[in-house]
Image (cartoon, rainbow, N blue to C red):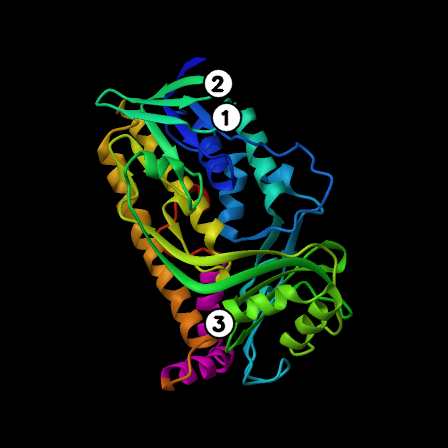
């Protein structure tokens, strides 16, 4: 097999799929590009079983998924809108005045975002890729050759050539390694435990998040009254939790949420993964660009990982299509460096804020931590501050790509 493309995207998860769909489709100004997408294991078009792994999608992500042509296919029981967020620290009760509450009605929005099954999101984006004319190759990257003229990507099915290769293949990016781009990795010494649960009390279409001295617990609302939990716990605590049987784990969940949703029962298996901060030394090189987790990994407590990656995809697609309209080479360094400057600064701002929350709200014990913990109640009493943070949660601040506005 030998195919010539403008861009080859390595990795067909949500971020890679979004990038390919935006590059190839008609949803953006500029010139559509010829796109090849490598995805070794595309999901079934209509997965039968629910996916334990979910993602939070911001309003900005909703906008760009519509521009990518994926939103309509995603809508349904595997996409659930949430209208409120309740955030508090263990130093106060779940119903105390210090609990920070965001409500969509207070900011004139129909909701604050969506919880989507990751596999359903990936499937919708791959369908959008096909509809846009991108060529999906069910293979993995095996070799990479870069030259002044272009890039050659070797797979088990043959060789693909292009002007640019984009790495959207996750934190263990094979493309990043093959291109010789370094990454700094710093473990958080925590594990995230994810599962689907059922609670005795209704979730009220709300996200519930409690900060504790040994981690952070979030309940994310799903259809039919279920919730997805993300428990980011210190390693020793996580090991003890994973050793519990299903009933005892449910009891521990209910207690960790301070009884806010009553009795909790597991509905799925428990998955867990180690948490780390990752930052690539460069997001781009000659004829190479990195997106999403291949470029940066942040703590999951704010649910921003996929949203940041989707914004990477939209920013790169916008710049490359504009360059194509000027008849520039898709692998030229000018647009790639503009992408790196744009997204590195935005990601650094978000990553710094998330790390502050983790250190001071979940693990801090000094005066600054106490101020941050009390600050939740202070924000809750200020309509202006609540609007500011609600806009950040909606993803509608900062320098947004056109597709996300």
Residue 180 showing in the rendered view = yes
In the image: residue 286, left or right of residue 101? left
Label 3 to label 1: alpha-carbon separation: 46 Å
Residue at the location (44% across, 67% down)? 388
Compared with 73, 210 (above or below) is: below
The numbered mark at residue 65 is none
Residue placed most toward the observer, 114 or 248: 248
Q: Residue furthest top?
A: 1
Main SS of the magenta part reads helix
Asked if labels 1 and 2 touch by Cβ distance under 8 angstroms, the answer is yes
Magenta segment: 368-394
Residue placed most toward the observer, 297 or 121: 297
Residue bearing mark 2: 157
Compared with 359, 274 (above or below) is: above
Quadrant placement of the N terminus: top left
Residue at the location (35% across, 64% down)? 352
Residue bearing mark 1: 139
Q: How far across and down, in percent of the image, does residue 328 sit?
A: 26, 25
Pointer 3 or 1: first along the chain: 1
Pointer 3 or 2: first along the chain: 2
**Mark 3 or 1: the one toward you:** 1
Q: How far across and down, in percent of the image, does residue 301 sit?
A: 50, 63
Residue neighbourhood size for the residue with mark 3, other residues' Cα within 10 Å, grouped as few (<14), some (14–19), many (≥20)? many
Residue placed most toward the observer, 105 or 212: 212
Judge whether residue 191 is colored magenta.
Answer: no
Q: How far across and down, in percent of the image, does residue 333 sit?
A: 23, 33
The numbered mark at residue 386 is 3
Label 2 to label 1: alpha-carbon separation: 7 Å
The answer to which quarter of the image holds residue 81 is bottom right
Asked if labels 2 and 3 touch by Cβ distance under 8 angstroms, the answer is no
């Amino acid at each position: 097999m030998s195919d010539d493309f403008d861009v080859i995207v390595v990795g067909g998860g949500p971020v890679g799929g979004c990038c390919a769909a935006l590059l190839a489709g008609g949803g953006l100004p500029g010139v559509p590009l010829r796109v090849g997408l490598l995805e070794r294991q595309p999901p079934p078009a209509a997965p039968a079983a629910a996916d334990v792994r979910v993602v939070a999608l911001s309003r900005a992500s909703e906008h760009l998924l519509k521009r990518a042509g994926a939103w309509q296919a995603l809508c349904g029981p595997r996409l659930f809108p949430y209208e409120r967020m309740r955030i508090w620290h263990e130093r106060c009760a779940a119903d105390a005045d210090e609990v920070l509450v965001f409500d969509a009605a207070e900011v004139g929005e129909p909701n604050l975002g969506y919880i989507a099954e990751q596999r359903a999101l990936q499937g919708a984006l791959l369908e959008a890729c096909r509809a846009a004319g991108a060529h999906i190759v069910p293979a993995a990257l095996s070799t990479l050759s870069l030259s002044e003229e272009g890039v050659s990507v070797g797979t088990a099915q043959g060789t693909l050539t292009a002007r640019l290769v984009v790495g959207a293949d996750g934190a263990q990016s094979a493309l990043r390694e093959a291109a010789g781009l370094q990454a700094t990795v710093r473990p958080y010494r925590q594990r995230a435990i994810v599962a689907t649960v059922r609670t005795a009390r209704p979730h009220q279409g709300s996200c519930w998040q409690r900060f504790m001295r040994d981690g952070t617990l979030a309940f994310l609302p799903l259809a039919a009254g279920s919730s997805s939990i993300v428990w980011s716990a210190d390693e020793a605590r996580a090991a003890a939790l994973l050793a519990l049987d299903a009933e005892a784990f449910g009891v521990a969940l209910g207690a960790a949420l301070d009884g806010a949703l009553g009795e909790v029962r597991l509905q799925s298996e428990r998955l867990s993964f180690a948490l780390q901060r990752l930052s690539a030394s460069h997001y781009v090189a000659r004829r190479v660009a990195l997106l999403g987790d291949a470029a940066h990994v942040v703590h999951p407590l704010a649910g921003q990982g996929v949203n940041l990656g989707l914004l990477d995809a939209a920013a790169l697609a916008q710049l490359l299509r504009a360059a194509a309209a000027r008849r520039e080479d898709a692998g030229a360094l000018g647009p790639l460096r503009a992408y790196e400057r744009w997204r590195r600064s935005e990601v650094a701002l978000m990553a710094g804020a998330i790390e502050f929350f983790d250190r001071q709200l979940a693990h801090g014990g000094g005066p600054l931590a106490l101020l941050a913990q009390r600050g939740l109640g202070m924000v809750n009493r200020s309509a202006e501050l609540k609007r500011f943070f609600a806009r950040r949660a909606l993803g509608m601040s900062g320098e947004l790509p056109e597709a996300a506005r």
